[in-house]
Structure formats: structure tokens, C-alpha cells
Image (cartoon, helix red, strand yellow):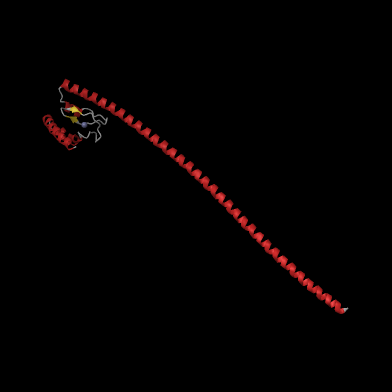
Amino acid sequence: MEKLNALFDLEVAKRVSTETKLIREEYNIRLKKAKEVYQEDILEQKYNNKDVIKKIHDDLGEEYQKQKELYRDELRRIKDDQRKALKQGKDELIEVRNEYMNKAQSIHKSYSDYLRMISDDYHIPYKILVRNAPMEDDNICKGMKKGNIRCNLKGKYDGYCKHHHSQMTRKHTIELVDDVTSIASLDVESKRLIDFNSVL
Ligand SMILES: [Zn+2]
């Protein structure tokens, strides 16, 4: 009986060992599988995250592009408006300037005619009369043309036109000499003037 018991115990121990081995193997297989599934999940999650991040990036990029285009359009519009306003301002300024010049020239001519009349009526040399008459501040050339005719061009250069600018420097010299010399120097001046023009 004892022998039988011992045999039984041995058989049980063998069986337990085999079963344990089987269970452990199955456990290991399941564990391995579970690990693989878990890793797959993690990877999938990662890819999903990547997709989400990429989408956010794309959306942001698109939005940025849109904003940039809007900004560009707005900037272009502002620049166009400015250009138009500037051009309009310039045109208006030119128009006003021309209008002023025409008026100034007309007044200058009337004043010159008036001085000429006084000169004839009272026998005062025209040049002397012009020299002593109140100066006009109209930006018309203060010079004198050939034959004692007042110039009516724009006085762009210190109140003289380019043809009569040389008369400005001689003005003070002329004032110191008598009338005869004054007329003589005027002739010289006219000759010089012709030279000056031929140079131009
Ligand atoms: Zn002139």
C-alpha cells in the first residue's frame, strides 16, 4: 500500500509539473501577444497623433496664407489710394500754380503798361521809372528785354528768368551811374545777353 501511495504521489507530481509547464507556456504566449497588441495600439496612436499634428499644421499654413493674401491686397489697395491721392494733389497744385502764374503775369503786364503810360505822359525814362516803382512780389522776372520792355517770364532764378538773371548782379552798379551811362550799359548788357543765349 505504501508503495502504491508513493507511486501515486510521483504520478501526481509529474502531472502537476507538466500542467504547470503548459500553463506557463500559454501564459508566456498570451503575454507576448498582449505586448504586441499593446505596441500596435501605441504605434497607431502615434500615427494618429502625427496625422492630427499634420492637419493642424496644414490648417495653420492655409490660414496664414489666407491672412497674408488679405494683408497683401489691403496693402496694395492702400498704396493705390495713396498714389491716386498724391497724383490728384499734384494735378490740383499744378493747376493752382498755373492759375496763379497767369494772374500774376496779367497783373505784371497791366502794371508795366501803366508805368509805360506814366513814362510817356511825364517824360520820365521808362527804365528809371521801373527801377524806382514799388517792387512787385509776384515771382515774374524783374529783368528788362531789348528796347526797354519788361520781361513777363517766370522769375525762377532769384526773381529773374534764365535770360535776365545776369541783370540782377549789375542792378546796384547801374543805380550808381547817371542815366546816359545807364542806357549805354543797358546796350552792353543786351549784347552780353545775346552772347549768354548763344552759349545756352
Ligand atoms: Zn526775363
Q: Which residue occupies the extreme right position in the image? A: 1
Q: Quadrant of the C terminus?
A: top left
State the image coordinates of residue 21 (x, y, percent, origin top left): 74, 70
Asked whether 195 or 149 is in front, the reply is 195
Relative height, residue 9 to residue 87 (above, below): below
Q: Quadrant of ligand 1?
A: top left
Asked whether 77 or 49 is in front, the reply is 49
Q: Which residue occupies the extreme top position in the image? A: 121
When asked about the image quadrant of residue 138, the answer is top left
When asked about the image quadrant of residue 177, the answer is top left
Relative height, residue 72 to residue 96 (above, below): below
Q: Which residue occupies the extreme bottom position in the image? A: 3
Q: Residue at x 85, y 76 (%)?
A: 5
Whether residue 93 is visible to the viewer of this picture, yes or no, is yes
Asked whether 78 or 54 is in front, the reply is 54
Whether residue 176 is visible to the viewer of this picture, yes or no, is no
Asked whether 84 or 4 is in front, the reply is 4
- Left or right of 67, for residue 22: right
State the image coordinates of residue 144 (x, y, percent, origin top left): 18, 30
State the image coordinates of residue 63 (x, y, percent, origin top left): 53, 45
Relative height, residue 81 to residue 57 (above, below): above
Relative height, residue 105 to residue 82 (above, below): above
- Left or right of 183, for residue 50: right
When asked about the image quadrant of residue 34, the answer is bottom right
Q: Residue at x 17, y 23 (%)?
A: 119
Q: Quadrant of the N terminus?
A: bottom right
Q: Residue at x 54, y 48 (%)?
A: 58
State the image coordinates of residue 133 (x, y, percent, origin top left): 21, 27
- Left or right of 165, for residue 101: right
